[in-house]
Amino acid sequence: MTVQYLTPEGYKKLVEELEYLRTVKRQEVAQRLHDALAEGGDLIENAEYEAAKNEQAFVEGRIQELEYILANARVVEGGASGEVEVGSRVTVEYEDGTKETYTIVGAAEASPREGLISNESPLGQALLGKKAGEEVEVNAPNGSFKVRILKVE
């Protein structure tokens, strides 16, 4: 059983998504299936029925995935120790002077476009356990680079 690290916000979002899938989306898909069956005809050639069955499989798979994540979730709020940990908000400066702020999250809620990077990513792994002022080498698939940690919250 793998621990799934989640921030309080990430936990809430996943709970809301699970509730939506169970209560709203399941009903929508069931109605699509019912409507496709009501059309009659050969089910093998019924494109709407096939699409609805595929969507049903996706929804049920996502429900199972969310149930697993939430059952194994450990909600964390980082930043209190001064060291980078899951839940920490970290501002770094790259070698070219570019500054970025990221929140370190578990893989289940990672979204780099939103500034949420996984603790399992090369940058996330390199930052864990470090403090403001430290320079960190990141071993990424495209090569190594360094960042300086400016702030840990």
Image (tube, rainbow, N blue to C red):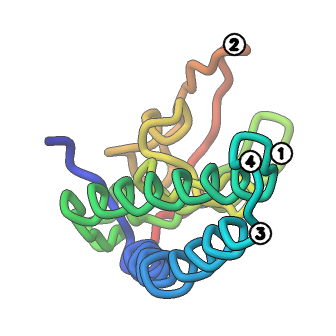
Residue 147 location, x and y as percent? 64, 37
Q: CA distance from mark 4 to mark 2?
A: 55 Å
Q: Which residue is tagged 1?
A: 97
Q: Which residue is tagged 2?
A: 143
Task: Give yes or no for contact between labels 2 and 3 (Cβ–Cβ under 8 Å).
Answer: no
Q: Nearer the viewer, residue 106 or 122?
A: 106
Q: Which residue is tagged 4?
A: 42
Answer with left or right where residue 6 lies relative to residue 98.
left
Q: Amino acid at mark 4?
A: Asp
- The quarter of the picture where residue 14 lies is bottom left
Q: Amino acid at mark 1?
A: Gly
From the image, which quarter does the N terminus lie in? top left
Dot 2, how many residues are within 10 Å of its Cα: few (below 14), some (14-19), or many (20+)?
Answer: few
Q: Which residue is tagged 3?
A: 39
Which residue is depicted at the point 38% across and 53% down? 65
Mark 4 or 1, nearer chain start:
4
Q: Amino acid at mark 2?
A: Gly
Mark 2 or 3, nearer chain start:
3
| Number of numbered discs | 4
**Up/down of 2 relative to 92, above or below:** above
